[in-house]
Image (spheres, helix red, strand yellow):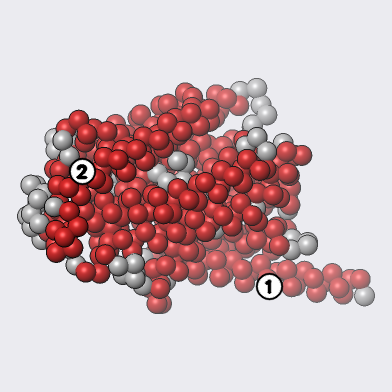
Amino acid sequence: ATDVGGGFSIGLGGLGFVMGISGSWLLFTGLLGAWLSAVLLIPKVSDLARSKGLLSFPQFLETIYDRRVALIAGVISAIGYLGFTSSQILAGAKLASATFIDLSLNQALLIMGIIAVTYTVVGGLKAVIYTDTIQWIILLSGLIFIGIPISYIKLGGFEAIRDTVAPEFLKLNNVSWQQILNWMFTIIPIWFIGMTLYQRIYAAKDRKTAQKAWAIAGFFEYPVMAFTGVILGMFARVALDAGLLSDFASGEMIDPEMGLPALLRTLLPVGLMGIVLASYFSAIMSTADSCLMASSGNIITDILRKHDSKNSLRLSQLFTLIIGITALVLAMKMPNVLELMLHSYSFMVSGMIIPVVAALFTRRPDKLASLWSMISGGSVTFGLIVSGLKLPLELDPIIFGITVSALVYLVINFVNKSFASRSIA
């Protein structure tokens, strides 16, 4: 529920609208990330967390490296999850404003922001865990048992869908190798550096419980949620091309992420539409609250280091509120949910994946090399995203950021080893 939120649910609908079922490859990378981290990451992190009493992802890095590395990781993670929270609020606002005609996007943003921020500030991680469980059940039930079958029937069944949509929409190869590579570099590593995921590892009863949860999560991401999301998005495209969306002319190009809400409003009966809308709002809330908790946790635990103070609860609530307000303002400036979410992923991954890889697979991880690899990787990716430069082969900024981060780590590590060898000699 935490991983598949508004960014993926609304974003997958947008992908299905523009490319059909090939958009499902986005969450295949989520399956790979979940299962790889269950095998490679959880055994080490879970045991270490219990022996050291860890609370955050940067604290894991601090046990491997030092406090400076943890501080930089805390800053990168806090900023990344701020952007991620913003993408969830924007997803909910798009869904609401497209469904309720008299509701503007900014009004919807305010409503979504206030609801998500308020119950997270008041209830904390326990509220997040309980609500996530319920929200995930509502999400899957609404989409699988109501959204897909009713839309399928109203559109006229498979023959009508096949005759309306372009043939490539029904194929799994309607995607470029660059796009799949970009998704792999962006999403697989997040399972190794995501603060929300480390919180779940620490909170699990034991290592086996966490690994079982990751295995189940991977299956729910692909194929369950992957195909559910893109099929509904493709149905929205069929409805538009067939002239069934009353607010839009046949063939008119609309915001792909608004097509799915328009489909639900047009084709579903009022009562059932409410259930499906609740499903999408559940997905959005389940991720927005977790990301808020992650960002405020980074600030309190890793940047200010006030998690052991007497007023740590009040401080956590205060910063959760501040981050929520900031995320709401950012959402008002950004047009695209999936783009904002993936940019946030890219910034975090390019800054932190190399130190984690070094911690997992090298005997003596280099503190100085890790520190500068984080700064260089995150800075390069952030700079390329902000600049808007057209990159070679249509590759994502994250690939260049991770490459720079890896090179910086290797060079500094090599120099340090050379100096150490000379000193010994």
Mark yes or no: residue 147 visible.
Answer: yes
- The answer to whether residue 260 is above or below residue 352 is above
Residue at far bottom of view: 393
Side of 40 where 6 appears, left or right: left
- Which amino acid is tagged 1? Val
Mark number, residue 307: none
Residue 224, x across and y down, in percent: 40, 50
Instruction: Check disc 1 and report the residue beneath it.
Output: 411
Q: Give the crowd class for mark 2: few <14, some 14-19, many >=20 residues within 10 Å.
A: some
Q: Say what amino acid the circle numbered 2 marks.
A: Ile
Residue at the disc numbered 2 = 150
Q: Residues within 10 Å of mark 1 (few under 14, many from 20)?
A: few
Mark 2 vs 1, N-terminal side:
2
- How far is disc 2 from disc 1 in space, using C-alphas? 58 Å
Quarter the C terminus occupies: bottom right
In the rendered image, residue 10, in percent from the top left (x then y), is placed at: 31, 48
Secondary structure, mark 2, is helix
Residue found 62% across the figure and 37% down from its top: 204
Q: Nearer the viewer, residue 283 or 111?
A: 283
Q: Would residue 261 be found to the left or right of residue 324 on screen?
A: left
| Residue 383 seen anywhere in this rendered image of the structure | no
